[in-house]
Image: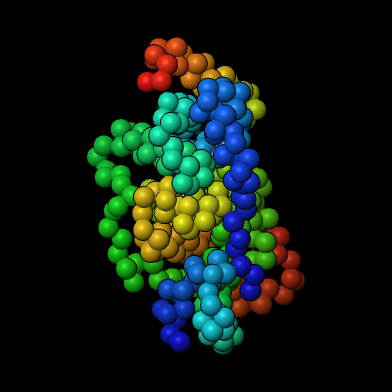
Amino acid sequence: MKCSEFLNELTNYLDGVLDARTKSELDDHLAWCHNCYVVCDTTRKTIEIYRDSELYELPDDLRTRLRSAIMSKCTASKKSQPPGS
Amino acid sequence: MSTIQPNIEQPVSEEMQLVRRAKRGDDHAFEELVRRYDRNVFRIAQHITQNREDAEDVVQEAFLKAYSNLEKFQEQSKFYTWLVRIAVNEALMKLRRRKPERTVSLDEEVKTEDDSLPREVADWSPNPEQNYNQAELRDILTRTIQGLPPGFRTVFVLRDVEGLSTEETADALELSIPAVKSRLLRARLQLRERLNRFFQKKGNGNGNADGDESSGDGNQ
C-alpha cells in the first residue's frame, strides 16, 4: 500500500468504518511507515483537541435571553397568522 | 489505534414526541427542543460566521424558522438534523452578507490529491495542548479553524465537534456522502498541518538531555 492510498482511507480508518480486511492492510502499513503513523496519530489528536476544546460555549445569561427572545417571537408569529395556515 | 466515535446520541423517539406535541401547538414542547439544541446551534453558527452577534441572530432565526415550518418537517430525519440544515443556511447567508467579495458556498470546487497531502510530518509532544493555558489554546484553535474554507469548516464542525454521523452531515448540508468524506479528510489534514507549528515536539531528534519538556515552549 502506498502512502497516498493510506491517506485516502484515513478518515474511514479513524472513524472505524472499514471492513476487517482493509483495516488490516492499513494497520500493516502503519506498522512500518512512521510518517503515516505520525499523520494518523496527530490527526486523531487534532479531532480530540477540537472536540474537547469547548470553543464557543453559550453563556447561561445569554442562553436565557436568547430562549426568551425565541419563544416570544414564536408566540408573536403564531398570533399574526390565522390558525391552520 | 483507537477510533473516533461521534459523541452525541439522541433518543429519537423522545425527540419526536416533543416535535409532535409542538406540532399540535404545545409551545412548552417546542421550548424543550430549544433548550435541548440551543448550545449546539450556537456553536455551529459561531464556527461558520466567526462572529458572536451573527451567531446570536442565527440561533434566533433558525429556531423561529423551525417553529414556523414545523408542519413541513416530514419526520424522515431527526429533528436536530433538520434544524442544523436551517441553521447552516442562515449562517452561510450571514457570512455572504459580511463577505460579499468572497464566494461562500458549500459547493466550492475541491481539488483532489496534492492539496491536502501532508507537507510536514512532525510528531507532536504528548498532550501538546497542555503546553498552553486555556486562553492561549482557545486562541490557537480559533485562529486555526478560521483559516479553513467555510465548506471545510462546516463539515468538520458538524462531524467532529458536534458528532453528527456522515449520513446526517450529508443530509444537513445537502451534500453527497463522498463529498462529505472528501471535505472532512481535507479539513482534518489541513487543521493538523496548521497545528504543527504549535504542537510539534521541540528539538526533534536533538536529544534534549535534561528531559524537561516544559521549558518555555508554551508562550507563543
Relative horizontal placement of residue B1, taking residue B43 as reference (left or right): right
Give the quarter of the figure containing the N terminus of chain B: bottom right
Residue located 46% across and 57% down the image: B167
Compared with B154, B123 (above or below) is below
Q: Position of residue B122 (x, y in %)?
A: 54, 71
Q: How is the image coloured?
A: rainbow
Q: Could you tell me if residue B206 is visible in this image? A: yes
- Residue B31, given in percent of the width and then of the height, sits at 58, 26
**In front: B110, or A80?**
A80
**Residue under the point 42% across and 51% down:** B171
Q: Is residue A1 above or below residue B159?
A: below
Residue at x 61% of width, y 60% of height? B5
B70 versus A2 height, above or below = above
Residue at 50%, 69% (x, y): give it.
A12
Residue B14 percent across, percent down from the top left: 63, 40
Q: In the image shown, does A45 or B86 lie closer to the viewer?
A: B86
